Image: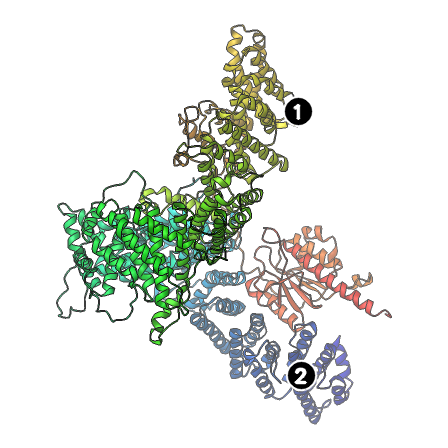
Amino acid sequence: MNSVLVNAVLSSSPDFHLLFESLTWPSDSWPGTERVEALTAFIEGLGPILAESDTTRCSAAKRRSIIAQVDSVVWTRCLPLLSKISAEAGEGTRCRESTAAACRLLGVCVPLCDRAAPGRVALSVLPSLQQAEEEEEGVPGPGRLSAEVASEAMAALVPSLAADEQLTLITLSSALSCIKTLPDAMVSKIIVRLLLTVLDCCGGAILTRVLKLVLGDMCSWHRADRTHVVAERTLLCLTALSEHLLKPHSLPSSSSSPRREVDPRLSVQFWRMVQDGLTHRDSVSRKRALYLLKMCVALSEEEGLDCPLSPSEEADDILFKWDPSRSKLLREFWEDYALVMETLEENQIHVVRPVLNRIDTLIQTTVNEGQAVGQVFFHPSWLLCVYQRMFHSENKSLMREGVCHLLELQVLRQPAFALAFSQFIAGPFMDVLSETSLFHKSVGQSVGDCPELGAKLQVFMITFFTSLPSAHRGRMLLQMIRQLCSKHWCAAPLLFLSQALSKLPPGPLLGIEGLAALREVLCCTVITHQVLLRGATQCFLLNSALCLIDVSAVTLDDVFSFLVHFRADESLSRGTQIWNQLCSWLLDNEGSFKPRITDGDSTGAAPQKETVRGYVQSEMHSYLRVPASAGHTERVPDSREADKLTRAMLLCVDMERNQAGDKIGTTLEALLSPLLDTLSRVGTNIYLPLRKSDKSLQLLLRLFQLGGAPSCERVGEERVDDVMVAMERLIYKLADPIHEFILRRLLGEMQGPFDVERAELYLCVLRQMVVLYKSTPQHHSKFQQTYFPKLIKCSLKVLQEPNQQIPSVANQVARAVAMASLATVCGLVEQEVIGMQSETLSSFKSLNDYFYTLVSSSCQSLGNLNKRLQKPKIDDLRDAGVQGGLLQDWGRVAANFLRDQWICLSFLIKAFGVPESVEISNHWATLKAAVSCGVEALALLPSGLVLPVLTFMEIVLPQLLLHEEALCVEAVTLTWELVQGLSTNALDFWPALKGFVSMAFHRKLLQLTDTSAPTLLAALKQIATELMELSQSKSGVLGVLLQHCCQTWLPTDGGSDAAVFSTVFSHINILTEACVFGPVFRRDQRLIQDVQTYVERLGEECAANVAVTSDNRDDQLPRTCVLAFLSRLDSSDLQHERLMEELLMDLLKKDNNISKSKVRYYSNSLQHRVKNRVWQSLLLLLPKLREEFVATVLNCVFEAAFCSNHASVKYLIEWMMILILVRYPHHIDSFWACFTRDHDKTKTSICTFLSVLVHFNVIIPNLKDKAVHLRKALDIILQWCFNHNFSVRLYALLALKRVWSLAGSQAEEGADGLRGMSTVIKACLNQAEAMQSTGNANKNWTRIQDHFFFGAFDPISDYSVETIFYTFPSLSEMADDEWIPPWKFEKLLCFSESASFPLRNPAPDLSRLQPGDWIQQDKGEQNKEERWAEVQKKITPWRLGIQEQEPELQLVPQQRAARLGKLHGALLVVASLIDKPTNLGGLCRTCEIFGASTLVLDSLRHVSDKHFQSLSVSSELWLPLLEVKPMELTDFLQVKKSEGYCIVGVEQTANSQSLQDYRFPEKTLLLLGNEREGIPANLLQMFDVCVEIPQQGVTRSLNVHVSAALLIWEYTRQHLTSASDEVDSNPEN
């Protein structure tokens, strides 16, 4: 239309100047789009006139005037308008349409100007493009264009610059720079509008040069910066250029045709970009990389040329090869590869798993080709991309599948492949192994089994390192160990990886660097809170070191320095298996270690081999060699030196002890002689340096601490340790000098800034010596009569000195040392290491009087409790540096001082009580003041130091509760809050919890009643409830409470007190909750529990089980503990009888509440588990119950049987009914009455009662009138044999068969009432069995007869703890964490076993059966899944069929729609990529209904397809259709972009906008993707915006027609709303 009007105007010889004036606009204004387009059409019409050679219509002068005016339009209209648009910096429709119009005007004007004009304009625009990366937030500087506007302007200029190669290359360079620096949103616009336009306008040599430049620049950028961002942008650029870079061209007929000049397939860096893209975190980048790969494969097959042309010297670096002679094999390989990579985009494991067999196919093809041809066509790195993609999956199951697949990879047995995979194993594979969830136990594994992945990892490590070339093993192992230090590892992955390393075949793989890497792992990585797992990991790492260290590359000093990092209380404890292995290893390698080069070895002679004994002796002399004292206070030596020497010495002694003929005493004396000499002089030689004395005492202390047996060694396993016996004899001779030296130092000499720490050392040595020689009368009497009384009096004297006005370091240190000394003595006496004679007794009484001294006679408070140290002042600037360390640590010193006071107080209150000399009004007032001080101490002390206060309160509170209840409540509540605050600190929490439970649930506090102390009793009940709640998230908490309470109520030593036991009725809820306790842990918590159980099951094979003190925090402990408590109850005791009856009623009530609150619940849910535990406990109590009580609860049992129960609960209820009828047969009539209930109410629950009749053989012997009851049973069963429900019929049939087997013999003997029934029942039974002869019914009939409950199980002989708590849960498919194995009860010494209630089942038949329930339908067949099943091969085409484009594309006329008054919007829907007629037909109908302007198809022939027409229902007659073939889409989209259309795609990308938030511009082009592939990678960069539809479900994507319909409707809704708003705002229209 515009062109017709323009031609008409121009043909009339108008006034061009006047037309210019009328069509142009003021330079400072923003014209409308129509005005700009009109001017564009006018100037475009001038082109033919200016090109005419005839000057009739237009003279030369007029031409020059017109050209000048056109040039003026460029500089005074176009460029200023573009600057205005840039200043707006918006994405609105106005900016977009104005930019497109202005750039089109620029593109029309520039060719009409002089030849230099395009260059001048380009040079004015290019600076804006080159400086775009410096702009902040996309706002250009004054006079400059924004990057987006500048790129559009340059795109309009490029066709005019094609002849200027230099300017073209400058433009290209600017575009490449923008790709690297601009924000992500601008990159695709630069590529599409500028880079592609440059390529389209170039040809010949210039095009080749441009392509080389682009490819080289992208490869160089990726090589220099191989990051995710760079990979994403380079792939975007190369995909957009793929039609140019990988375009097939016709080859000359000659066979010697040259190769293409620009071929990315020959670039290794190009293939590295593709591989990085395949494993990229962004799905669009992965799609682009796969697109490039497919395109390269298709091009290689089409050209049929070798790739590369000639063999390369660096053949290993060639990632892609093509041989025309193997074209079919190569094509199939890459098709399979693409299938795997495309399928991995799915997140559901059931979708991915069927194609994983293709990985095996890929691997096998690679191996076979390499062996057959002698060269590898498929580089192993492509396979690594597959694994890395699986490792990065969001789905943990898929990640686990990938790890397991790699672990079982047989090809790694080949050295070449093992070497090719090595860096991947050390990098991404190690990274994914740090994922804890991989180590969950698999289906079918029991608790305590090694997780499947852990077992596979051990085999894999052995296979991989055995296959790896020997020259690379050491370096590979070092990389893996260093990888352990590079990130945080959780406990389980680190444990199993360490275990796998320990299983490697022995070999010299690790040198000094490997030892340093292992040490780094121990220090930085093995830091988990799970002590047992931490210790086990240390054991495995030490095993690894012993197997893999190259002893010739490390010195003995390196080895012993390494061993210092293994903790004796967690792993490397003397006497454990790992200790003995270490001794054997040292003995085997004696003399093979690398010799040490000392400072004195400067002669050049070869160093001599060093033995372990020689090393220890040398180190002993070096250790005790100290410089003379400098005269100032010295720090206490670092104890790590003593640890290292102690370990070396003990290992040396144990190593030599294993050799025949060696005398331990002689060896020890030789090694310890320097130490013994020093210790003999510590008390007499005043010139002996203090540092030397300290070091000798440190070494002595560590020898006794590390030399002893592990703290958790079991009772009864004590062995005589000849090493420690010999050492004690040697030290015994020096005991007096050591004691005298320590006492001399403690009695007033310790006043320096470091003497607090030094006193801790001396007191530890003193404590160790007193305990060691407590059986020696001579030393014992000296301590009792001399040493301790003197130490107490001196320390007390220091404490009684008045405080200085300005506290000095000496005074405060002396007070801290004095209190620590008193606490040590009190602790030793309390532990009964030494007794109290008259001298010691007198001293302790003086100490007791000191603590209870009043502040003043008028103030009724204790002045010496909670007495605090004052922070000292620094006296001299010269001492500031020395004393500064003490002042920084003063908080710890002051806290220890306060703690030591309460250690003394807790001992004194036990031994002496409150002294009579205290002048407070009465005894209770004194206790009140002491407890008040205790409450204050709880607030002052750090949480880890409150145990002595709790011990004190445990003694005092029972005495005070009747007089000061409020204070007791405050003390208990405050303590509980403190313990709760420690729940995240495992080190302090458990000791504090045990101390609190002992205090708050003291036997006298448990005896409280509602009348004696109602407030305190209520507080204790609330705390008990909160403890049980805490136990749901923190395993082991309830076990602490329950063990204490059960031991209090019913001591295992038999000293039961009726008054104490009666308190159980106030806290019976604790027992009830314990019976059903068992939190449902999160998967991560359950995993840690399973791994700990696995480590425990390793036994002494793992030294951590011996070294680590077990706290038994098993979540099943509360149940086993309470069940053991119940097993010891005596039914003849009235209180015991009452407890069992009340507990049983509480349990039945809990079961009934669950049944009422939730009729249906999932298997193994918490409700299911609780019900199961209830009936297990009831079965345990049944033999101890009175007959009268059973009669009262029998109806409750029957009611429970009528509820909907899971199989496991049903079996327990049935067993309960059977046992009741066996023990109390007179209740049989009540049982028969259950069958007479309303059948609608009973439903299938009647099966429970029929199951009881299946076991009628154990009930009938105790019945009177057996024939009558047999007849009754048969009458009842026959009624149910023909029930409409299949399950009921099956149960009835089985019961009939079993009961008739009992009645048959009596019927033959002529029993009344039975003989007449014989023929009828047999016929009925035969007919019923005949009905079960075929199909699924036959399988169920066979299965129910073989089921454990109706087959091997005997209700009488199988009654045992094992059957109830282990066998039944396992056979009824309860989760394995519900199985309580018998050994857990055996570990409890308090469990009472009897002949009528054995622990273990006498016959093993039941435990050998497999779990299963006949009700389940062929589960094995129904859920059977071929893991490696063949799948339909669907290779997504990378390009669709391309046909010749028709000369012109015309819109379908809209006359029909116009006649009906239908209006069309500006929405353009492009469906050229869709190939299914049904989708196209539905889409056509949707577009027509919602008024889209045009629907674009790949072929108009679809319209005649019957499938299309069946869904379009003639809508194609009313909708304009346009044909654009897939190969033409790029150009078509470019044209529409230049017309101002916003290109919108439906795709999930990192920058996608949600459909509900996006506002559609009026001129929108909606591009729809292919049904399978989606939108091809080479078109993704064309989008202005990607929109995604919010999803809530699991399914990954919607049908393409459905997705399009949602977007079309949203577009229509928005524009309908905006149109109605416009109408409302203009009512006059």
**Residue 1463 showing in the rendered view:** yes
Q: Residue at x 38, y 60 (%)?
A: 800
Which residue has dot 1 on it?
A: 1239
Task: Name the element at disc 1.
Answer: helix
The foreground one among 1399 and 1411 is 1399
Q: Are marks 1 and 2 in contact (CB under 8 Å)?
A: no
Report which residue position mark 2 lands on.
78
Residue farthest toward the bottom in the current orientation of the protein: 61
Residue 1104 appearing in the image? no
Q: Earlier in the sequence, mark 1 or mark 2?
A: 2
Residue 1361 in the image: above or below residue 235? above
Task: Tell me the quadrant of the picture where the C terminus can be found.
Answer: bottom right
What's the residue type where badge 2 is placed? Cys
Is 881 or 1224 nearer to us in this picture?
Answer: 881
Residue 1189: quadrant of the picture: top right
Counting from the top left corner in percent of width and height, residue 1147 is at 56, 33
Q: Is residue 1143 left or right of residue 1?
A: left
Q: Is residue 197 left or right of residue 902?
A: right
Report x, y in % for residue 1226: 56, 16
Q: How is the image coloured?
A: rainbow
Q: In front here: 337 or 1371? A: 1371
Please tell me which residue lies in front, 826 or 798. 798
The amino acid beneath tag 1 is: His
Percent x, y of residue 175 = 54, 77
Mark 2 surroundings within 10 Å by alpha-carbon count, few (fewer than 14), some (14 through 19), many (20 or more): many
How far, Cα to Cα, is label 1 from label 2? Answer: 91 Å
- Count neighbours of disc 1 (C-alpha within 10 A) and say few if under 14, some if 14 to 19, many if 20 or more: few
Q: Secondary structure at mark 2?
A: helix
Total marks placed: 2
